[in-house]
Structure formats: C-alpha cells, structure tokens
Amino acid sequence: MVNRRTRHRLRRENKQIARERISVLFNRVKEVFSEEPQLAQYYVNLAKKIGMRYKVKLPIELRRMSCKHCKSLIFPGINCRIRIQQRREPHVVITCFNCGGFTRIPLRNRGISSR
Ligand SMILES: [Zn+2]
C-alpha cells in the first residue's frame, strides 16, 4: 500500500519524466521534419498524449508548431507562413498551407495562458 505522501512524490517525478520525454520528442521533431514529416507528426502526437496523460503543458513552441484547424504539423518556410501585422494591435498571423487556415497570436500579452 502506497501512502499519500509517496503517491504525491511519485506523481511529481512522473511529471518531471513526462517533461523530459516531451522535450526529447520535440528535438526529434525538429530533426526529422524536413525528411520525414510523418514521423515528425507521430512524435508530436506522442508528445501531446504524454502531456495529456500527465497533465504537463507542452512547450509553447510545440503548440505553435501544429495548426489549430487541421492539427497538422507546420513549420515556418516549409508549410506555413508567418506574418507580423502591425495594424490595430500587433499580432502574428500564421497561415497553414495544408488547410489555408489562419492562426492569430497577439503580441501584447506574452503569457497566452488560455491556449
Ligand atoms: Zn491547417
């Protein structure tokens, strides 16, 4: 029987392991994307699953790397375009070449907590 304190400690360790695994996957994604996009997509899905399982937030870079609309992996200069718009409030517009969808990221509040 595992007491409560031990269980709490184990959970924290699991989270740490999950974070490490996600960052390893993230590095692999960057390595393989140009040659094996499908493998890269697989790594991203895996990282997302780990993140959900252990309730670990994915690094913001990784979240930016997948299209909000079609969920496919997007890389600047390969299959998406990034433009900075200064009109009204400054924001970044990411255009996905897969589905043609736009993702707007406001530059003012840097935290972006809701996404
Ligand atoms: Zn898309």
Image (tube, rainbow, N blue to C red):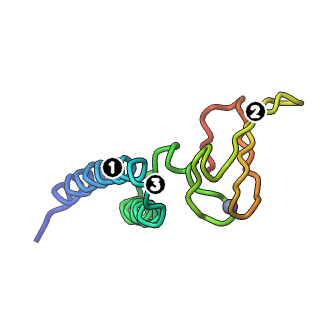
Report the disc number at residue 43. none
Q: Are marks 1 and 2 in contact (CB under 8 Å)?
A: no
Which image quadrant for residue 106? top right
The image shows residue 84, relative to residue 40, as above or below, that is above
Residue farthest along the left direction in this orientation: 1
Front-most of residues 68 and 37 = 37
Report the disc number at residue 84. 2
Image coordinates for residue 65, horizontal then vertical, percent:
55, 50
Which image quadrant for residue 109? top right
At 89% from the left and 30% from the top, the residue drawn is 88
Q: Which residue is mark 1?
A: 19
Image coordinates for residue 20, horizontal then vertical, percent:
29, 48
- The answer for how far apart the CA atoms under marks 3 and 2 are is 24 Å
At 73% from the left and 50% from the top, the residue drawn is 95
Number of disc labels: 3
- Which is nearer the N-term, disc 1 or disc 3? 1
The image shows residue 94, relative to residue 43, as above or below, that is above
Looking at the rendered structure, the secondary structure element under dot 1 is: helix
For badge 1, the amino acid type reads: Arg
For badge 2, the amino acid type reads: Ile
Image coordinates for residue 3, horizontal then vertical, percent:
15, 63
Looking at the rendered structure, the secondary structure element under dot 2 is: strand
At 10% from the left and 71% from the top, the residue drawn is 1
Q: Which residue is mark 3?
A: 33
Task: Tell which tag, 1 or 2, sits nearer the viewer.
Answer: 2
- Which is nearer the N-term, disc 1 or disc 2? 1
Looking at the rendered structure, the secondary structure element under dot 3 is: loop
For badge 3, the amino acid type reads: Phe
